[in-house]
């Protein structure tokens, strides 16, 4: 939930989305546009700090 509340924006970095599966309601976290931009801006920094993490290069 820290990612949801990370920025003081309308969306945060992720948002919770509800859906139904097999007759049961569930939720999942989806990256927001703010989260995509944050990833793009911070990728190089975190790649240098954690070179063994397989994080895709942002588009």
Image: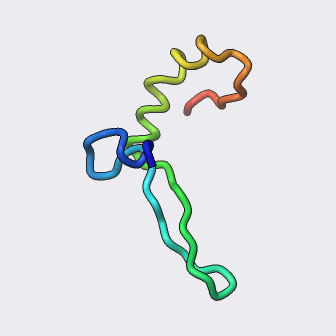
Depicted 10 relative to depicted 50: above or below: below
Q: Residue at x 65, y 31 (%)?
A: 56
Residue 20 position within the rendered picture, expressed as x and y whole percent measured from the top left: 58, 80
Q: Residue furthest bottom?
A: 23
Q: Residue furthest front?
A: 1
Q: Residue at x 68, y 15 (%)?
A: 51
> Colour mode?
rainbow
Count of numbered circles on the image = 0
Left/right of residue 32 with respect to residue 56 in the rendered view: left
Depicted 2 relative to depicted 53: above or below: below
Which image quadrant is residue 15 in? bottom left
Residue 36 position within the rendered picture, expressed as x and y whole percent measured from the top left: 46, 39
Q: Residue at x 66, y 29 (%)?
A: 55
Q: Residue at x 55, y 62 (%)?
A: 28
Residue 59 position within the rendered picture, expressed as x and y whole percent measured from the top left: 55, 33
Which image quadrant is residue 26 in? bottom right
Left/right of residue 41 with respect to residue 49 in the rendered view: left
Depicted 24 relative to depicted 37: above or below: below
């Amino acid at each position: 939930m820290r990612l949801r509340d990370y920025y003081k924006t309308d969306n945060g970095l992720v948002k919770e989305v509800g859906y139904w599966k097999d007759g049961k309601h569930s939720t999942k976290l989806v990256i927001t546009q703010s989260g995509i931009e944050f990833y793009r801006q911070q990728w190089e920094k975190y790649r240098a700090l954690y070179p063994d993490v397989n994080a895709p290069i942002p588009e």
